[in-house]
Image (tube, helix red, strand yellow):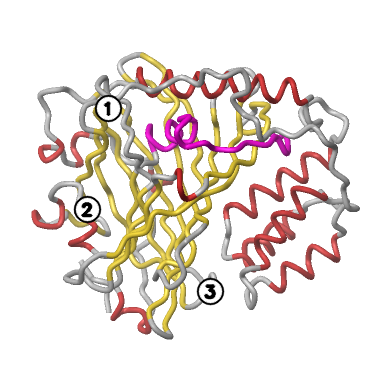
Amino acid sequence: MIRILFLSLLAVFIGSPSSPIRAQTDNSPFPSLQTEPQTKAPPLTNQEFVRMLYQLPANPSMRERLVQDLRTRGINFQVTEGLRSLVATKSGNDSLLRHTLEEAERRRANPTSTTARLPSMAEATELLERARKATLGAAQAMPDYLVKQQITRSHALGQTNNWVVYDRLSIAVSYRQSAGEQYKLLSVNGMPAGEEESEGSGYGKKLGGTTSSGEYVSMLADLFDPQTRAEFQPVDTDTVRGHRTIVYEYVVKQEFSRQTLSWSASLTSPEVHAVVGYRGRIWVDRETNRVLRLEDISSEIPSGFPITAASSVIDYDLVTINEQSHLLPSRAVIELSDHLGQQSEQTRNDILFRGYRKFGAEVKITDIDDKDFPPDKPEEQEPKPVTPPALKPQVKKP
């Protein structure tokens, strides 16, 4: 049976001139920031960490507790290459767990540095307000652009995190202030997509599998939109690609959310949808006031909905479009879990963003093909995917 899962991170808000971003006007834009000091448990020992790590394959829910302990308690041991390899093996190469472990290692190695020390509440609040203004201002000033997504799609039976690649996609994405994001499938496993598969933004309905949208302008703008009523709390510090950051946790309740999950049992079955809440973390550069990393975890998923979990981690970096620098995604990892009757599986999309350039007003996304992008670097080429026999009935082959 073919399952279609769709994580729509695309907000209703697009930032067009007819729908201006409203500024926060009260004197306390982030009332959820707390000033009370929090007690801290002793750092994790190597034995504790490894013991929890070995529980992950049989108990995937342990991952959230492990991430939380790494963030709140830290570690008292050195992170070796052998330990990194063990984390990758036991966690299914989980990107969030890897990031969090490296954060803990930086704090352990240099606990007294200004990078590792949590700032005052006044500094954290001021930086968050500057980040809000910078993010919303950048959304309004974003040019029309074109980019190619290189997506490696994997799945795993049950909740095992035993990921197996089932296909690799190349997708052209255009963004216009007036129309938002539009998508065109260019190739599947290196072969040009058929005309029916590639048409328009609904290619996922014809291709099957997990797709997503909204990793670009709209997701961050929506998080900072006052209507979303996101609650923020500074919780940590980190260094992202050499930039000193403050890490904030956030929560968006379902009643104010525009994030949507969609699911269909087959290519011809009707879709079911659910608007969900979400929570996660943002990494804000202390110098540029920009969000360099966004973690998003769906919450308040309705009971009985086929998708039981959804999360994403998006890294942002500066790219040049029409001789101007803009902060846009460089990589995203999106994971979903779903069930149908007694059957359940996980899916993961690992997305690289390549070849950003200006998108002319006279060009249509349907006219774009691989020749409109620079050639892929040799290190970005992937081996031919292999699909396990047990999962073949669930995946539409190109």
Of badges 3 and 1, nearer the viewer stands: 3
Q: Name which residue type carries label 1.
A: Tyr
Q: Residue at x 37, y 84 (%)?
A: 390
Q: Nearer the viewer, residue 359 or 182?
A: 182
Q: Is residue 187 left or right of residue 132?
A: left
Q: Residue 159's mark?
A: 3
- Determine whether 208 is above or below 215 in the image: below
Give the image location of residue 35, x and y in percent: 79, 32
Mark toward the start of the polypeptide (1 vs 2): 1
- Determine whether 15 is above or below 371 in the image: above
Residue 89 among magenta residues: no
Q: Residue 187's mark?
A: 2
Mark toward the start of the polypeptide (3 vs 2): 3
Residue 232 among magenta residues: yes
Residue range corresponding to the magenta coloring: 216-238
Q: Is residue 210 left or right of residue 183?
A: right
The residue that mark 1 highlights is: 145
Distance from label 1 to label 2 (Cα)? 20 Å
Residue located farthest toward the right when viewing the structure as drawn:
42
- Determine whether 257 is above or below 163 in the image: above
Distance from label 3 to label 1 (Cα)? 38 Å
Give the image location of residue 373, x and y in percent: 25, 35
The quadrant in which residue 264 appears is bottom left
Q: Nearer the viewer, residue 337 or 89?
A: 337
